[in-house]
Amino acid sequence: MDKQVDQYQAFDEAVPVLIVGGSLVGLSLSLLLARQGISSMVVERHPTTAIHPRVAGLTARTMEIYRSLGLEQDIRSIAPPFSKDSKVFQAESLAGQTFNDTVEDMSAFFTDASPAEGSSIAQDILEPILRNHAKRNGVDLRYDTEMVTFEQDQDGVSAIIRNRSDGTSRRIRAGFMAAADGSKSAVRKKLGIKQHGAGTIMNNMSMVFEADIAELFANRNAVMGFVRNETVMGALVPYPGTFIRSDLYRLDIWYDPNKESVADYPESRCIPLIRAAIGIPDIPVRVKTVLSWEMAARVSDRLRQERVFLVGDAARVQPPAGALGGNTGISEAHNLAWKLAAVLHGHAGLGLLDTYETERLPIADLTVERVTALSQQRATEDTKQITVNTLMVNMGYRYLKGAFEIEDVQDTKPINLPNEWRGLPGTRAPHVVLSQNANRMSTLDLFGTQFVLMVGPEGKEWIQAANEAAEKLNLSLSVHHIGADLTDSNGTFCSSYGIDATGVILVRPDGIVGYRSSEMADNPLRSLENALSAILFSC
């Protein structure tokens, strides 16, 4: 990406948002933008979706996001079963002597704080679902296409992309660009954004293979395991199959990149290592692919530079412990999408885009720190050393400042159990079961496309104020009156959101509480106008 972009007199194509990288996070961002009515172009240098299983689980929070996009049923229909009581083992081999069994923290995947359960779907099975939905939603997908170079100016981004098959290039003009191009992000490097953190933890050689060992994993009820014997020391990870493909497994071992490469791991070397890890010397093994990867802990110093934003591994990389890497990237995309849409629709000022970094950079630091600690804790045989709660990290974080009205509270901790926040602005809106026309639903089912105002049972004065505020700001605002159009059968709504019967909650399109009034305001219209203006025109 060392060429300079010409001063274009014309462009071959124009698009509101150009997304560089069409893997898990890039595809998710394109769908989140499409739901907001924003077109995007996705350029992906690989010829198709992921062939490596990679991400091995979606948390409940991620499934909430996919639920809002209408993806949940498609994912459930194809995902393999997922156990709530999975373990991580340490053993001589998969079939050999056990040194230790640790009950895996599955709270990020199964929690009463969510209407959705996590999924064990692997990335190579998930991405085609995302791709198909993206196509149906009008996303312009360009596989086998690479970013050559780009430049920014006051009004947008000018880029050259090239088809890797036929060598043809196109000049693209975009309002904004999102870099979802992985841990070695060429976009980040061109921008000159540096990274901080512990850096490289270890380098792994990853062997993906087929073997008849599903029963051995089932007997251990394990989501993964660490093996150690005279021949091999590494990690074994299962990727349960579906009708799309058969079961796959991955063996990761440490290697020195200064002395070896993938070329030094032919099938003749890999199969004995895999058999030693399984513990059955003559078991048939079919090696599918061998890849190298770096386990690292790094966070980009910035997540935004003018009109370009970093998401996913381009923004931060972390150890795979807890399976939170891709899930965190999807939450980053969720945060960014509605803000880009609000600006592109003319509902918000450019200052709103500053809050992407303001909100997500501290969460990136916190997530990488906690996941790195979890990785270290899991490596010990002392299970009492595991103190990291993945539910708190993935769903219970708190933005300390950003696009919301800050409340003066004594509690400044950055994470908590999700329900303990009780509607505090800057945190995820709690899941509460409601009924509409006798049909049960979650409060979370109200969020996704626009701002949502939820009015307490005795706070009807807020409703007229909300309609007037939305009209003045030319903003789409969905208003729900608890006890009228929505029934709170369990009587838990107000306590869950920290308001009384006359109070109100304003929730952003990404499900984060933007404003809360615990009781009726002296001037409801002015209060809502001030809150919405503060959020949309953050600076």
Image (cartoon, rainbow, N blue to C red):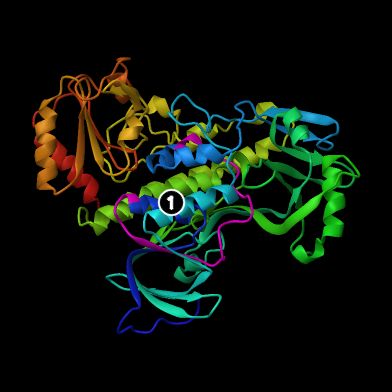
Q: Is residue 501 highlighted in magenta?
A: no
**Residue 72's x, y, as percent?**
45, 39
Q: Is residue 261 visible?
A: no
Q: Residue at point 47% right, 51% down?
A: 130
**In-image side of 246 versus 346 (left or right):** right
Q: Residue at point 21% right, 23% down?
A: 456
**In-image side of 370 versus 284 (left or right):** left
Name the residue that disc number 1 marks: 133
Q: Is residue 61 highlighted in magenta?
A: yes
In this rendering, the answer to whether 25 lies above or below 417 is below
**In-image side of 496 versus 277 (left or right):** left
Q: For this rendering, which residue is in front, 440 or 401? A: 440
Marks counted in the figure total 1
**Residue 517's x, y, as percent?**
21, 29
Structural crowding at the residue carrying mark 1, measured as other residues with C-alpha within 10 Å and reported as few (<14), some (14–19) or many (≥20) = many
Q: Residue at point 56% right, 63% down?
A: 184
| Predominant secondary structure, magenta span | loop
Residue 499: quadrant of the picture: top left
Query: What's under tag 1, amino acid-wise?
Result: His
In this rendering, the answer to whether 169 lies above or below 308 is below
**Residue 298's x, y, as percent?**
55, 54
SS state under label 1: helix
Report the span colored magenta: 35-63
**Residue 69's x, y, as percent?**
39, 44
